[in-house]
Amino acid sequence: MSTPEPLRHTIRTLLDSQIQAVLATQHQEQPYTSLMAFVATTDLRQIVFATYRATQKYANLLANPRASLLIDNRCNAETDFRNAVAISVQGTVREADAARRAELLQLYLSKHRRLRDFVATEGCVLLQLDVECYYVVSRFQNVAELRMD
């Protein structure tokens, strides 16, 4: 997985097949994790998710917008040691661009139709993680990196 196109394909396949990720933020100098529904943009440069403004994760992101997402395909079986793929995504989170909000919301809802009422509530905010790097771990210890420079 050292060449960009096969690596991009692996990333795209995993991101498309999974509906939830673990968001890691920082709270009082400690990691704080949250399970989130997400979608990635076609170019893999942003990952979009939604939350209420009145959550700890949102407060954490206001204080420090640096975050990480973990997306994986494990099934909690022994075979995960050789078959599971995990992606750690690092970047900076911000409110979805006003110019692209409708497009990003449509993308999000195309994957998460059942969350339409959730994202339509007044206290909900659509966020985007601007991806700096993907770290892909496969076959237990094989690590590949895709920088989005």
Image (cartoon, helix red, strand yellow):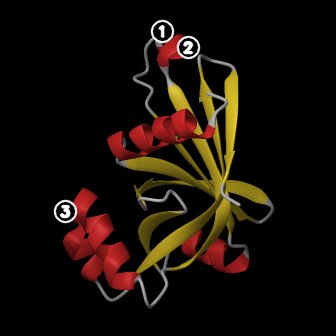
Q: Residue 78 carries which label?
A: 1
x then y, percent, for residue 93: 61, 71
How far separated are the C-alphas under marks 2 and 3? 33 Å
Give the mark nearest the N terminus, 2 or 3.
2
**Label 3 neighbourhood size at 10 Å, few (<14), some (14-19), many (20+)?**
few
Residue at 66% from the left image edge and 57% from the top image edge: 148
Q: Which mark is residue 81?
A: 2
Residue at 43% from the left image edge and 31% from the top image edge: 73
Query: Which one is in front, 10 or 98?
Result: 10
**Label 1 neighbourhood size at 10 Å, few (<14), some (14-19), many (20+)?**
few
Disc 1, disc 2: CB below 8 Å?
A: yes
- Looking at the rendered structure, the secondary structure element under dot 3 is helix
Q: Which mark is residue 135?
A: none
Amino acid type of the residue that numbered disc 3 sits on in the rendered structure: Arg
Q: Is 55 drawn above or below residue 99 in the view shown?
A: above
Q: Is 16 drawn above or below residue 7 in the view shown?
A: below
Disc 2, disc 3: CB below 8 Å?
A: no
How far separated are the C-alphas under marks 1 and 2? 6 Å
* Residue with the mark numbered 3: 113
Give the mark nearest the N terminus, 3 or 1.
1
